Amino acid sequence: MQKKIRWISWIPAVTLMIIIFIFSAKNGVESTKASHTFSEPLLKGVETVFHLQLGQEKREQVLENIDFIIRKLAHLTEYLVLSLCVAFFLWSWNLSNTKILVWMVILTAIYASSDEIHQLFVPGRSGQIRDVLIDTSGALCGMLGLKFMKTKKEKIENV
């Protein structure tokens, strides 16, 4: 069974890498439009609930701030999930837990770096070291989550 899992264990990580690549290949205008699909309704909801009447200039500024937060949370989340997919791949090769935890972060950080380099060649986009750090933070969150679950599992088994 382990050998069968080994042959397909790379599929989730590679699939997510392809999805990330496709999103990163969108030019600046398309990327902003995609962010607005989340931030615009969110801002409208806040305006409605709190009866706010923002001027156009202030509204654009707030929308830009919401977009920034949404984008960075998306970075963190997608790389957290990617790190877990990488951990699944590494687990299928019978590596020690420590090696899995270390390599899942390293491999995810390498992909994050390559993704930001890719964005340097996309019109209206730029590669940001800050984004690599956010992406790697997502991988670290994935690592900490796995470590936490392993610790909980060991405590349950020892009871």
Image: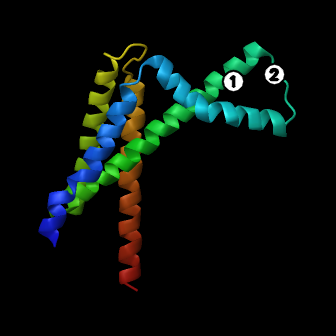
Left/right of residue 63 with respect to residue 155 in the rendered view: right
In percent of width and height, residue 109 lies at 29, 37
In percent of width and height, residue 76 lies at 45, 40
Residue 137 visible? The answer is yes
Left/right of residue 96 with respect to residue 152 in the rendered view: left
In percent of width and height, residue 18 lies at 30, 38
The C terminus lies in quadrant: bottom left
Residue closest to the eye, 147 or 65: 65
| First reached walking from the N terminus: tag 1 or tag 2 | 2
| Circle 1 SS class | helix
> Is residue 122 depicted above or below 65 in this figure?
above
> Is residue 81 depicted above or below 53 in this figure?
below
Q: Residue at x 67, y 30 (%)?
A: 40
Q: Residue at x 22, y 61 (%)?
A: 91
| Residue neighbourhood size for the residue with mark 1, other residues' Cα within 10 Å, grouped as few (<14), some (14–19), many (≥20) | some
Q: Residue flagged by tag 1: what amino acid is it?
A: Val
Q: Residue furthest right?
A: 51
The N terminus lies in quadrant: bottom left
Q: Residue at x 69, y 18 (%)?
A: 60
Q: Residue at x 42, y 19 (%)?
A: 27
| Residue neighbourhood size for the residue with mark 2, other residues' Cα within 10 Å, grouped as few (<14), some (14–19), many (≥20) | few
In percent of width and height, residue 33 lies at 55, 25
Q: Quadrant of residue 62?
A: top right
| Circle 2 SS class | loop
User: Mark 2 and mark 1 in contact (Cβ < 8 Å)?
Assistant: yes
Q: Residue flagged by tag 2: what amino acid is it?
A: Leu
Residue closest to the eye, 45 or 152: 45
User: Residue beneath label 1, please?
Assistant: 62
User: Residue beneath label 2, please?
Assistant: 54
